[in-house]
Image (cartoon, grey):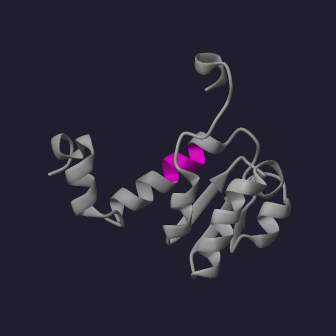
Amino acid sequence: MGASFGRGGATGFLQDLQQADCIVIQGSNMAECHPVGFQWVMEAKARGARVIHIDPRFTRTSAVADTHVPIRAGSDIVFLGAVINYILSNELYFHEYVLAYTNAATLVS
C-alpha cells in the first residue's frame, strides 16, 4: 500500500471482523501493532469466534488467540498451501459463496 499510495493502510473494513466466526492472523502481532483494529477481533472472540494466530513468535496476540501455530520463519507459503489443499480436498469451503463471488465457477465443477 505504501509504495502505491504513499502511506500504508488496511485493505479491508476492520469493523467487519466483529462478524467473523473464525479469524486467522498471520505474521502480525495485531494486539500490539494495531490495537484499534484488534478491538474488533476481541468483539468477535466475545461472540464465540475462534482466533488463530500463525507466527513464529509467541506474542500478546498469541496469548489471546485460541490457537497459536508457531511455524518456522519463511515457511508461510508452504503452510498456506497445505491449508488450502486440506480445505479443497475435504470440501470445507462455502460452495455457494465461492461460486457466486469468485472466479471458481470457471475452475470448479
Q: Is residue 11 visible?
A: yes
Please state the horizontal and vertical placement of residue 63, each as a whole percent of the image. Answer: 82, 69
> Which one is nearer the viewer's eye here, 70 or 30?
30
- The magenta-colored residue range is 78-82
Visible residue check, residue 54: no
91, 100: nearer the viewer: 100
* Between 14 and 65, the one nearer to me in the picture: 14
**Residue at position x 67%, y 42% from top?**
75
| Residue at horizontal 70 percent and vertical 59 percent from the top | 38
In this picture, residue 55 sits left or right of residue 15 = right
Q: Residue at x 43, y 60 (%)?
A: 86
The dominant secondary structure in magenta is helix
Q: Is residue 50 depicted above or below 98 in this figure?
A: below
Residue 107: image location, x then y, percent: 21, 42
Q: Position of residue 43 (x, y in %)?
A: 63, 72
Quadrant location of residue 52?
bottom right
Percent position of residue 83, x then y: 50, 56
Residue 6's place in the image compared with 43, above or below, is above
